[in-house]
Image: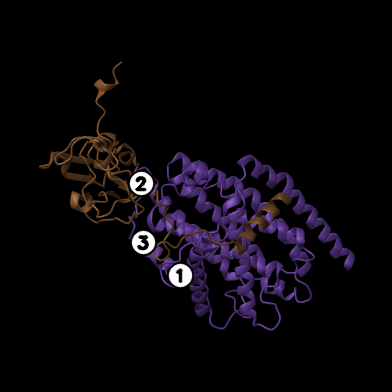
Chain colours: A brown, B purple
C-alpha cells in the first residue's frame, strides 16, 4: 500500500524534471560525424574522383541498392561510368563505407531526404559526387597505390621509392 | 429546488460535460507526457489544443463497421448505454447553488444506480461482438464492477450518515463546517479506488487490458462507436472526479472565489489525480483484483460504516 503511494509520488516528481524530447524541425538534434546518413562519393585532394569502380561496395551491400559500371580513362585509371544508389532500398548499414578501399564512398550526418515520389530517391553519380575529400582530407589513393598508370610509373609518386630489383637481394 | 430553466440547464450540462470529456483527451495526453518527461501533442493549434478537433474529425471520418458475426442490434445499443447512463448521472450533480438539473431527494442513490447500469454497456458490447477476447473483457467487467459496486455504495453511506440526506446539495451544505474528507477519510480512499474501478481506468482496466485482450470489450468496435466508449469513459472520469469533489471536498464551498470556480478547481484536481494514477501504477492480476475487492475493501467499508454509525449515535 505504501509502495503504491511512493510510486505515485515519484511519478509526480517528474513534473519538475527537464523534458528530453528534441523539438525536431525547430531544434536540430546533434548528429555525430560518424552518423550513418546520406551516402556521398568523395574526391581526392587533387580534385579527381576517388572511386575506382572496384564493385566492392555493391557486393557488400546487403540489400543490393548500389549499381555501377566500371570504365577506364585515357591514363588507364578506373572510374565508374555511372554510379547509382537506390535510397528507397538503402538501409544505411555502412557496409559500403567499410568495404571501400579508397575512402571514396562515405556516409554523412544527414537524414533529411524525404521525397513524395519513389523514383526521386534513386541518386545518380552527379547527385552523389561531392567536391571535397569528406572525412579523410589528406588521403590520395593514386599517390600511394603503387600501381602503374598512364603518366606515372611504379615508384614515381610522391614519397615513393623506386621498386627494388629483386635480383640484387639474391645470395 | 430545481433551477429556473430546466431545458437550458439540461442543455448546458450536456454541452459542458461533453466538451470537458473531449478536452480530457488532450489533458490526459499532455499530463501523461509531463510525467514521462515528454511534451505530448503540442503541434495543432496553441499548446496542441486543437488536437481534440483533429482527433474528432479523424474519428468521424473512420469507417463505422459492424462485423458480420456480431449481434447487430445489441452491438449498436451497447455504446449508447455507457453514454446515456453517465449523462443521466450528471442530472443530480450540484455544480453551484441552484445550478443543478434535478435536485432528487435520492440523488446519491440515483448516481449509484446509473453507474451500476453502466456495466451493461460493457457486458453487452463484449457479448454481442462474438469474439472471445471481447467476451473475456465483458466477463471481467461484470465481475469487477459487481464487486467494486458493493463497497462503492457502502463507502458513501458514512457521508450519508453524517449529512443525514441522500440529496447531493444537502450533502454539500452539510460540509460548511468541515469537509467530509476529514471525518470520512477511509470512506474517501475507498471511494477513490472504487471510482477508478468503476470508470475502468488504468490500474483497473482489466476489461480492456490491451496487453492481454487486444482491446477487451471494444475489440470489434470502430469509428464513432469506439469513440462513444472513449467519450463515455472520459465523462465517467469527469463524473467520478466531480462526485469526489461534491461528497468529500465540499463541492462549491470555498473562500473568496465564487462557487463555480471552486467546483471546477476541485474537479480538475481530481481529474489530474486520476491521470497521475494512470501514469504511475501497473495493472493487477485479475484474481488479485477480486480478492482485494472482497477480502480487503468490503470489510474496510463495513468497519468504516459501523464506526461512523456508532460515532453519530454517540454524538446524539
Quadrant location, the N terminus of chain B: bottom right
First in sequence, mark 1 or 2: give its number. 1
Residue linked to disc 1 = B49
The residue closer to the viewer here, B270 or B169, is B270
Distance from the alpha carbon under mark 1 to that under mark 2:
34 Å
Q: Position of residue B266 (x, y in %)?
A: 64, 71
- Residue A155 visible somewhere in the drawing: yes
Label of residue B67 in the image? 2
Distance from the alpha carbon under mark 3 to that under mark 1:
15 Å
Q: Position of residue B172 (x, y in %)?
A: 70, 73
Residue linked to disc 3 = B58
First in sequence, mark 3 or 1: give its number. 1
Q: Chain of mark 2?
A: B
Q: Residues within 10 Å of mark 1 (few under 14, many from 20)?
A: some
Q: Position of residue B174 (x, y in %)?
A: 75, 74
| Above or below, A123 relative to B132 | below
The residue closer to the viewer here, B245 or A106, is A106
First in sequence, mark 3 or 2: give its number. 3
Amino acid at each position: 500500500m505504501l509502495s503504491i503511494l511512493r510510486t505515485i509520488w515519484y511519478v509526480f516528481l517528474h513534473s519538475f524534471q527537464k523534458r528530453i524530447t528534441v523539438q525536431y524541425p525547430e531544434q536540430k538534434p546533434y548528429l555525430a560525424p560518424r552518423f550513418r546518413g546520406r551516402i556521398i562519393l568523395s574526391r581526392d585532394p587533387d580534385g579527381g574522383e576517388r572511386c575506382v569502380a572496384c564493385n566492392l561496395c555493391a557486393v557488400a551491400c546487403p540489400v543490393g541498392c548500389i549499381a555501377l559500371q566500371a570504365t577506364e580513362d585515357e591514363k588507364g585509371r578506373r572510374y565508374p561510368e555511372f554510379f547509382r544508389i537506390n535510397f528507397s532500398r538503402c538501409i544505411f548499414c555502412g557496409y559500403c563505407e567499410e568495404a571501400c578501399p579508397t575512402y571514396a564512398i562515405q556516409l554523412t550526418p544527414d537524414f533529411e531526404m524525404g521525397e513524395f515520389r519513389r523514383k526521386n530517391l534513386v541518386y545518380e553519380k552527379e547527385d552523389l559526387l561531392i567536391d571535397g575529400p569528406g572525412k579523410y582530407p589528406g588521403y590520395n589513393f593514386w599517390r600511394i597505390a603503387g600501381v602503374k598508370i598512364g603518366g606515372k610509373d611504379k615508384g614515381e609518386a610522391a614519397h615513393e621509392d623506386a621498386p627494388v630489383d629483386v635480383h640484387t637481394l639474391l645470395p | 429546488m430545481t433551477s429556473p430553466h430546466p431545458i437550458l440547464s439540461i442543455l448546458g450540462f450536456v454541452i459542458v460535460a461533453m466538451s470537458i470529456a473531449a478536452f480530457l483527451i488532450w489533458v490526459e495526453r499532455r499530463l501523461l507526457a509531463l510525467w514521462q518527461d515528454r511534451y505530448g501533442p503540442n503541434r495543432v493549434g496553441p499548446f496542441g489544443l486543437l488536437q481534440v478537433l483533429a482527433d474528432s474529425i479523424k474519428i468521424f471520418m473512420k469507417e463505422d463497421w459492424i462485423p458480420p458475426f456480431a449481434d447487430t442490434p445489441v452491438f449498436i445499443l451497447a455504446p449508447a448505454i455507457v453514454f446515456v447512463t453517465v449523462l443521466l448521472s450528471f442530472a443530480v450533480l450540484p455544480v453551484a447553488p441552484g445550478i443543478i438539473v434535478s435536485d432528487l431527494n435520492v440523488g446519491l442513490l440515483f448516481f449509484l444506480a446509473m453507474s451500476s447500469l453502466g456495466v451493461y454497456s460493457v457486458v453487452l458490447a463484449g457479448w454481442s461482438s462474438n469474439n472471445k477476447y471481447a467476451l473475456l473483457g465483458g466477463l471481467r467487467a461484470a465481475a469487477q464492477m459487481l464487486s467494486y459496486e458493493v463497497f462503492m455504495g457502502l463507502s458513501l453511506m458514512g457521508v450519508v450518515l453524517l449529512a443525514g440526506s441522500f440529496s447531493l446539495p444537502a450533502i454539500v451544505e452539510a460540509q460548511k463546517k468541515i469537509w467530509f474528507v476529514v471525518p470520512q477519510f477511509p470512506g474517501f480512499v475507498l471511494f477513490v479506488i472504487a471510482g477508478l474501478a468503476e470508470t475502468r481506468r488504468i490500474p483497473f482496466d482489466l476489461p480492456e487490458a490491451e496487453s492481454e485482450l487486444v482491446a477487451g470489450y471494444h475489440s470489434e468496435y470502430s469509428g464513432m462507436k469506439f469513440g462513444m466508449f472513449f467519450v463515455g469513459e472520459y465523462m465517467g472520469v469527469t463524473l467520478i472526479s466531480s462526485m469526489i469533489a461534491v461528497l468529500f471536498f465540499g463541492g462549491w464551498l470555498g473562500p473568496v472565489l465564487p462557487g463555480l470556480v471552486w467546483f471546477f478547481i476541485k474537479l480538475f484536481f481530481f481529474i489530474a489525480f486520476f491521470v497521475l494514477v494512470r501514469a504511475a501504477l501497473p495493472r493487477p492480476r485479475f484474481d488479485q483484483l477480486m480478492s482485494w475487492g472482497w477480502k480487503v475493501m468490503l470489510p474496510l467499508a463495513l468497519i468504516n460504516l459501523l464506526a461512523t454509525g456508532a460515532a453519530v449515535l454517540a454524538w446524539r
